[in-house]
Amino acid sequence: MLHERLGNLKLANAIAIVLKAENLLAGEPETDSLRADPELVVRILEDGSCTDENWLKHFWAGLLATSCAADGKSESSLALVELFSQLTTFPVRVLTVVCTRAPKVLEDSGSVSAKPLACKIGELKVTTGSRGLERDLGQLSALGLLENSHSNSPSLLGSDEVQLTPNSLALELFARCNGHRGSLRDFYSQ
């Protein structure tokens, strides 16, 4: 089915995503009993095969790996795949920086939140390669991944710094893109 839908390059990228997902699941107990919704798998492989960048293939593989469950149904996976498929390379790079660097607050209840991350606009542009940082931040905010505040937009600042705060949805998406199947607390306390 995938061979009919994908050209040779996309097919090679899809296979790379599957192999990366398999590697991510290799350390999990009882992986033989895990299943994923076939339509969701096709969606991940179709969207993920459009990239040639290994780090993005890794993120798609993480989503594939975390979409596997014993009953073959992962309720939140479809929403996260839909969300991730709307992002282009540069917003994903910004999201990666923000989710990696923002200070995390680990609650006793197991929930995780982030504190604002102060970023120099010039450094963020260099780190992410973004030439349209304001657009990328706007997209992340519009998709509900950054806490919405006036300081998210560099044009609204009188300085060269922006305060960025990934919300719980962004933190969950980033953890799942990295193949983490456990609690967010476990992922962000490493």
Image: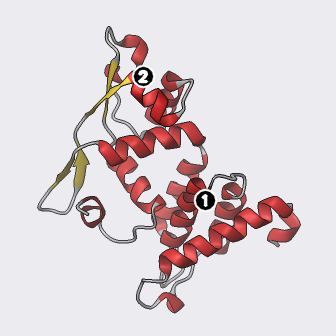
Left or right? Give the position of 52 relative to 62: right
Q: Between residue 165 and residue 90, name the one nearer to us.
A: 90
Nearest the viewer among 67 and 122 is: 122
| Residue 104 x %, y % | 22, 49
Q: Taking 168 as reference, is 158 above or below it?
A: above
Can residue 77 be seen from the camera position used here? yes
**In front: mark 1 or mark 2?**
2
User: Of helix, strand and loop, which one carries label 2?
Assistant: helix
Whether residue 73 sits left or right of residue 14 in the image: it is: left
**Structural crowding at the residue carrying mark 1, measured as other residues with C-alpha within 10 Å and reported as few (<14), some (14–19) or many (≥20):** many
Image coords of residue 143 (percent x, y): 48, 38
Q: Which mark is residue 57?
A: 1
State which quarter of the image contains the C terminus: bottom left
Q: Amino acid at mark 1?
A: Lys
Q: Quadrant of the N terminus?
A: bottom right
Under mark 2, the amino acid is: Gly
Question: Which residue is found at the position 31% from the left and 44% from the top?
Answer: 101
Characterize the local packing of mark 2: few (<14), some (14-19) or many (20 or more) Cα atoms within 10 angstroms: few
Residue at figure coordinates x 49%, y 22% from the top left: 134
Residue 54: quarter of image: bottom right
Q: Is residue 69 left or right of residue 88?
A: left
Q: Going from the N terminus, do you reach mark 1 or mark 2 first?
A: 1
In percent of the image, x 22 and y 58: which residue is there?
A: 111
Q: Which residue is mark 2?
A: 122
Where residue 36 appears, x then y in whole percent?
58, 76
Q: Is residue 72 above or below residue 53?
A: below
Residue 73: give x, y in percent of width and height.
52, 75
167 left or right of 51 in image: left
Please name the residue shown 51% across and 84% down the image: 34
Vertically, is 170 above or below 7?
A: above
